[in-house]
Amino acid sequence: MSDTPSISPVPVLAKNEWLKQRDPTLAGDIAATLADPEALRFSDDDEQFIKFHGFYQQDDRDKRKTGKEYIFMIRNRLPGGIVTPEQYLVFDDLAARYGNNTLRITSRQAFQWHGVVKRGLGPLLKAINDALSTTLAACGDVARNVMAPSTPSTSPLVDEVLADSELVSRELLPRATSYHQMWVDGNELNLGRQAPAEDPLYGRTYLPRKFKTAFAIPPLNDVDVFTNCLGFVALADPANPGRVLGYNLLAGGGLGMSHGNKATFPRVADVLGYFPRAHLVDVAKAVLAAYRDHGDRTNRKHARLKYVLAEKGAAWFRAEVEARAGFKLGEPRPMRFTKQGDLFGWHRQSDGRWFLGLYVEAGRVQDTPARQLKTALRRIVEKHRVEVRLTPSQNLLLAHIPEAARADIGALLAEHGVAVENQAAAVRRASMACPSLPTCGLGLAESERALPGILDDFERELAALGLAGEEIIVRMTGCPNGCARPYMAEIGFVGRAPNKYNVYVGGDEASLSLNHEFRASVKREDLMKELAPLLRRWRDERLPGERFGRFAQRAILPGLSAANS
């Protein structure tokens, strides 16, 4: 027997980890490329750095046969989806001046500008910052935009929770980056590679992957809080129902996966415990630091926090968080979610003013021949200075509207073809889609461009079955990364290949449980052929008041499990 001690192999870090370690300023050669009028694109290495600055390099895939046309998607950071009137007017103007004249609402309550060319990056990012917003950490291996309930009338806790989301967003921003030098101050960067100070929270190599945070207020789960890496569920003070007493802490949710890779999977978060509101920032930083220290830096497909929880367990992770936060979490307090989704039309706010919920198909604020939503919103904000709030389901609210302005706002919308009542069928209002083709480089199949036609099919089928008024949560993505959260939908479509989708059924109205695969690789034209028999069974066999998702869990999925066993 040999006396030679065994040597454990040194883990091979993912390429992104070497890039961050080499240049923790995240500057790369971005400034040099910006200054070079002949350069059409950023290098492969810088393509990773620019994500931390809030934008992605893309190309129009519809035009690839004639050559790549490089464009950029820019995303900003809007905690809780709150947009002041002044900001909205700037954002609208930037879409027309530098983008494709659309604003896209993300499924995480931010805006994206699409179709921006390289020469527009500097002016666009500077204008966003001048409007007191930012694109810093809207993408990249950092804490992303913090979600929170945006509807003014859902709970007296909304204002406090929005303030807490802003606080956590600010405290989780990276500090040691080149962002402000480059996009705000416009200074030339020192491109030498001397080691700068490490970021005080993130360290030299930031996080293994992206990190998503959300706040929720029961009984409304409009943020899909269980799909986040970090979740805070607000609990009211029994002695003062308008104040937040503390939060239940959730960790380890996430939806991205890869087709054919069983080591990757969507996962709902664990409930770790309860803590008083005063400890909010300490807990947020503790969860982030535990992920920073224990996340997988060798395999980016296995790098999300959900895999740490799945493999090491909730009790282990809770102890890690407690050690970093410096106190013990209490046992989780009772909480009950009953629904998700948005309110449409006119509603009273808790302060007596009004808000108006507007449906935005696939989150795309744009003008079409039939519906000039973008122009209508600009005119309303210019005239009435209303606040705009972006929802987690890619819709928007006009908030803080006085009674005297309601009639004029309704008339302006009608003038531009935008309905206030009966804005869309119930199944359409409950839908979401990611952009996918032609701009997203990860897209395997159509999503945003395919969803309207698919919803037309749904509406026809439901009407034929006598179910025209029924709501079904339908979500679609062009790849398995799950940006529109399809794995929580009552019916989810996930792109598998050009014109082919995996079909999932069985999510619930409160977004508490994952759905399950029903069919794989279904052609776009065959989707309704597969679903029509299920809809018919739902009509004929459901229990009183039973939604499609619950019916699928009870009557459809057990049969699939038995057939596959």
Image (cartoon, rainbow, N blue to C red):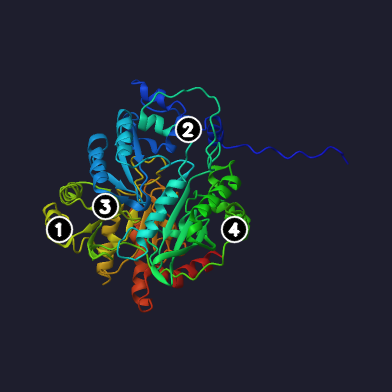
Q: Which residue is mark 2?
A: 26
Q: Residue at x 25, y 46 (%)?
A: 88
Q: Nearer the viewer, mark 2 or mark 4?
A: 4
- The residue at the point 11 percent across, 53 percent down is 415
Residue 98 picture quarter? top left
* Residue 551 shown left or right of residue 356 in the figure: right
Q: Give yes or no for contact between labels 4 and 3 (Cβ–Cβ under 8 Å).
A: no
* Coordinates of residue 165 in the picture (x, y in percent): 41, 53
State the image coordinates of residue 542 (x, y, percent, origin top left): 38, 76
Q: CA distance from mark 1 to mark 4?
A: 50 Å
Residue 244 is left or right of residue 388, and the answer is right
Residue at the extreme right of the image, as rendered: 1
In the picture, the disc for residue 143 is none
Residue 358 or residue 544, whichever sits in front: 358
The nearer-to-camera label among 1 and 4 is 4
Q: CA distance from mark 4 to mark 3?
A: 38 Å
Q: Which residue is mark 4?
A: 327
Neighbourhood count class around disc 1 (C-alpha, 10 Å): few under 14, some 14–19, many 20 upward: some
Front-most of residues 237 and 373 = 237
Q: Which mark is residue 405?
A: 1
Please state the horizontal and vertical placement of residue 484, each as a whole percent of the image.
38, 53
Task: Give the Cα distance between marks 3 and 1.
Answer: 15 Å
Q: Amino acid at mark 4?
A: Phe
Closer to the N terminus: mark 3 or mark 1? 3
Marks 3 and 2, the one that precedes in the sequence: 2
Q: Secondary structure at mark 1?
A: helix
